[in-house]
Image (cartoon, helix red, strand yellow):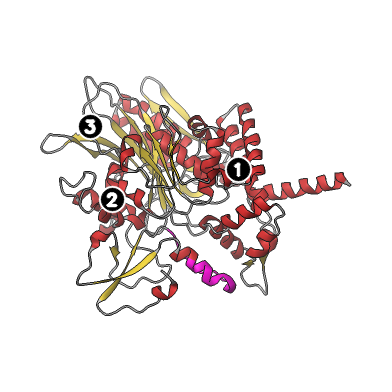
């Protein structure tokens, strides 16, 4: 569809609909590239428009009727939380099998909410109605905390309860902290939608559960994306509750705007320890935690908590110094894949292909997908990002836009041939790449592939998870330094106006033919586009951040090498 089609006026009896929109369309200030840029971001990204007659409009075709004319760049309506809530309560019995009527309809009725919208710079979602924090006693204490950030919004326990007819179990929230008694009506409605979404993602399998005598505890995470692009991170630990005889598992779920998997895993250890004594023991610990402010990178917060027969305990919660890696454990990624296989997955991700990961364990899926996204730093995955897809939402794999998705292996028959790359993470597998569109091995420049592999081999000397994470991250960070680290001089400023990136001059400045070929493709991605837009908005001069520091280090190293040659 060309731009002229989009700009055609609508007839009085027509409405405009859209489908599969997972990207944000942003107008560039570079007039020379404007036409190409708009087509690439809007139309080539499948943010498609079409006209349908009101009289014969059929929503089963997979479109959301907006009822209004959609302007270019406007956010789609609806969000993941509300759509999940409606979906759980509106699916008729008997329509939950493969090939069920309206499957694509239900999927696309919530598709736009899965988009991973980019947050406005410096704008973090705040937890609703936080308790008053403990005031800092002196200035030296203030730098240890992130202003306005608290550990969590909710802790809930999701239990499996028998349905009314007693034939099966369904997840229900049996404990919630904090309980909010004074809220406006719209706040109550939003909370109810959020809680319904939590039950779905806490038990995403969609299977008929039965009482168990043994169950292996597992920890995993999920992400809920709102209409404004804000993200809520869900951390879950499922285990068999205390008691005798067969019983169904239950899930502890923490909802937070903060991403720090390791830290929340430690919190779950403390919650689980108290749950074994009594559910009432959880409340005082979580109350103390909620009153504490979230520590800055590299710092620690201490929580005092009383446990019968043990007395008062001091729990230390420390954030990693490398804060961009605090939600990641690369060790799990390399346990599932070889170095060469990781490189192929990275190549597919860096060109924003559709990638599905398959595994038996929920924890493996969530950890690996977060790790792959972290390999892209300093760039950010801008598209659909669902570490664990509930079975009821499995139709999302049919989307034509880029995605990183996690699917349990027992659902493999539902997703075959739906992606550009399908990766098997399980221990017992015939081959790692179940499906591939091909060409992944030729995406990255050969010389730089060799350098990445050599750098990754150094992780064998790492003695801690933090050290291993740093080695892996810097291996791929250095790749971006080598390929696109020379961007700054090609952002031109004039008369105080916003900068303009000279794309053609930028890639023509690269001497290596193979590197130049890669960069010409990479600069067409959404992740690079939004990165460079942020640079254009900044004032000319030195920039902040580890990527810029690595660029300076590399440039100084090259100068020294050149000087030594002479």
- Label 3 neighbour load within 10 Å: few <14, some 14-19, many 20+: some
Where is residue 10 drawn, in percent x and y? 32, 78
- Label 2 neighbour load within 10 Å: few <14, some 14-19, many 20+: many
> Residue lying farthest left?
165
Residue at (67, 43) in percent of width and height: 447
Residue at (40, 47) in percent of width and height: 419
Q: Please give the range of residues in magenta.
A: 23-39
**Vertical side of 506 occupied by 494: above or below:** below
Is 28 in the magenta? yes
Q: Which residue is mark 3?
A: 209
**Vertical side of 498 occupied by 271: above or below:** above
Residue at (26, 54) in percent of width and height: 106
Q: Which is nearer the eye, 236 or 154?
A: 236
Q: Tag 2's secondary structure?
A: helix
Q: Which residue is mark 1?
A: 476
Is 227 in the magenta? no
Where is residue 37 drawn, in percent x and y? 52, 67
Q: Tag 1's secondary structure?
A: helix
């Amino acid at each position: 569809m060309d731009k002229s089609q989009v700009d055609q006026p609508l007839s009085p009896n027509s409405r405009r609909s859209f489908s599969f929109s997972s990207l944000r369309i942003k107008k560039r200030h570079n007039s020379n590239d404007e036409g190409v840029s708009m087509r690439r971001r809007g139309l080539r990204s499948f943010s498609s428009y079409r006209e349908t007659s009101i009289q014969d409009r059929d929503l089963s075709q997979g479109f959301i009727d907006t009822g209004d004319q959609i302007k270019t760049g406007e956010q789609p309506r609806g969000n993941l939380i509300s759509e999940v809530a409606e979906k759980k309560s509106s699916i008729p019995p008997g329509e939950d099998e493969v090939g069920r009527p309206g499957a694509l309809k239900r999927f696309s009725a919530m598709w736009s909410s899965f988009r991973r919208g980019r947050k406005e710079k410096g704008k973090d979602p705040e937890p609703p109605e936080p308790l008053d924090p403990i005031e800092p006693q002196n200035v030296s204490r203030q730098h240890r905390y992130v202003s306005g950030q608290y550990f969590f919004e909710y802790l809930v326990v999701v239990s499996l309860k028998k349905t009314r007819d007693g034939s099966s179990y369904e997840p229900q929230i049996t404990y919630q902290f904090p309980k909010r008694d004074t809220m406006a009506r719209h706040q109550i409605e939003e909370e109810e939608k959020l809680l319904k979404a939590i039950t779905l993602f806490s038990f995403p399998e969609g299977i008929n559960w039965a009482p168990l005598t043994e169950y292996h505890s597992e920890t995993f995470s999920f992400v809920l994306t709102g209409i404004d692009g804000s993200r809520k991170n869900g951390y879950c630990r499922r285990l068999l509750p205390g008691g005798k005889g067969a019983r169904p598992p239950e899930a502890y779920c923490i909802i937070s705007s903060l991403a720090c998997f390791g830290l929340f895993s430690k919190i779950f250890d403390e919650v689980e320890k108290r749950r074994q004594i009594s559910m009432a023991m959880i409340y005082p610990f979580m109350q103390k935690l909620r009153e504490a402010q979230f520590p800055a990178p590299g710092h620690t917060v201490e929580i005092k908590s009383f446990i019968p027969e043990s007395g008062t305990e001091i729990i230390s919660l420390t954030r990693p110094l490398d804060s961009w890696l605090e939600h990641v454990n690369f060790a799990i990624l390399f346990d599932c894949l070889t170095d060469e296989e990781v490189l192929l997955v990275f190549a597919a991700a860096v060109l924003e292909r559709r990638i599905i990961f398959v595994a038996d364990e929920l924890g493996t899926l969530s950890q690996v997908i977060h790790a792959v996204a972290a390999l892209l730093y300093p760039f950010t995955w801008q598209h659909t990002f669902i570490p664990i897809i509930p079975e009821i939402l499995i139709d999302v794999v049919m989307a034509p836009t880029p995605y990183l998705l996690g699917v349990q292996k027992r659902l493999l028959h539902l997703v075959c041939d739906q992606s550009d790359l399908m990766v098997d993470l399980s221990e017992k597998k015939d081959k790692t790449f179940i499906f591939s569109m091909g060409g992944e091995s030729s995406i990255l420049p050969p010389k730089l592939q060799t350098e990445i592999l050599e750098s990754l081999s150094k992780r064998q000397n790492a003695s801690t998870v933090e050290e291993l994470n740093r080695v892996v991250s810097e291996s791929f960070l250095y790749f971006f330094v080598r390929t696109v680290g020379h961007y700054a001089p090609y952002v031109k400023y004039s008369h105080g106006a916003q900068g303009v990136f000279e794309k053609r001059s930028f890639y023509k400045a690269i001497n290596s033919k193979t590197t130049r070929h890669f960069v010409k493709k990479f600069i067409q991605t959404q992740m690079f586009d939004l990165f460079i837009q942020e640079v254009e908005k900044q004032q000319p001069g030195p920039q902040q951040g580890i990527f810029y520091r690595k660029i300076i280090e590399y440039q100084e190293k090259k100068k020294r090498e050149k000087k030594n040659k002479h």
